[in-house]
Amino acid sequence: MKQIFLNSRIREGSGKKAAHKTRETGDIPSVLYGHKEDPISLTISGHDLWQILHQATSEHLILHLKIEDSAEGELLTLVRDVQHHPVSGDILHVDFQRISMNEKVKVGVPIELNGIARGVKEFGGILDHGVREVNIKCTPKEIPENLPIDVSEMLIGNSIHLSDIMMHYPQLEFLDDPIVTLAHVSPPKKLELMEEEEAATEEVEGEEVPEEEGAEKQKPEE
């Protein structure tokens, strides 16, 4: 696991007004908690954090957090939550959780689909990405950057579920439902429309045409 370092400093003041002033300087308000210690309000560089997240596959990172002018020194932390502005996408706040290399933590890991499915390449199907992240529990050193899945042999109608890859990662405890879909190959849209039209036609043809109201049945000739 690549080591990532981030500097921080103790943040003075609290509340929305103090947080707004922090963001005006280009910094991001954050908080450090965990291990039954009192939470610490921190300030981190927005530029430094953006550079780290830009190169990462997930926001749930393990960071070596350095706190300036503090007896805490350098701490091993997990980026537990990153709050974004709903419109601009700017980072508003970050939560850091204290962890240790020997304790298991819960974290989300992204799913990476590799290759071109046969159903797409040969038959014009559509590869649907299922959930893009699954939740696991393991020690920090066991956290993978992503979970790669080879989809090259998938045909139309094929699916890959979480249960299909779990045996490849015995060191990880998967917390999601094993039947959750990670990838699926759907038929081409035109084929779907044709199948729907055929099904609708069969339904109409199979229905009995009711007799007109008031129509008299013809009597058999004597």
Image (spheres, grey):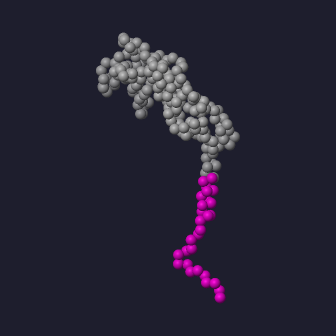
Q: Is residue 170 left or right of residue 89?
A: right
Residue 131, percent from left and from top = 53, 36
Quadrant, the N terminus: top right
User: Eyeballing the image, is 191 above or below 35?
Assistant: below
Residue 184, percent from left and from top = 60, 40
Q: Is residue 51 visible?
A: no
Measuring 64% from the left and 84% from the top, which residue is drawn there?
220
Work out which residue is located at the far right of the displayed protein and give it.
122
Quadrant, the C terminus: bottom right
User: Eyeballing the image, is 63 above or below 151?
Assistant: above
Q: Is residue 200 magenta?
A: yes
Measuring 63% from the left and 35% from the top, which residue is drawn there?
151
Q: How many marks?
A: 0
Q: Is residue 43 visible?
A: yes
Start-end of magenta stretch:
195-222
Residue 159, percent from left and from top = 61, 40
Q: Quadrant of residue 87?
A: top left
Q: Quadrant of residue 49?
A: top left
Say which of 33 and 190 sits in front.
33
Residue 122, percent from left and from top = 69, 40
Q: Is residue 5 magenta?
A: no
Work out which residue is located at the far bottom of the displayed protein and give it.
222
Measuring 55% from the left and 78% from the top, which residue is drawn there?
215
Measuring 65% from the left and 43% from the top, which residue is drawn there?
156
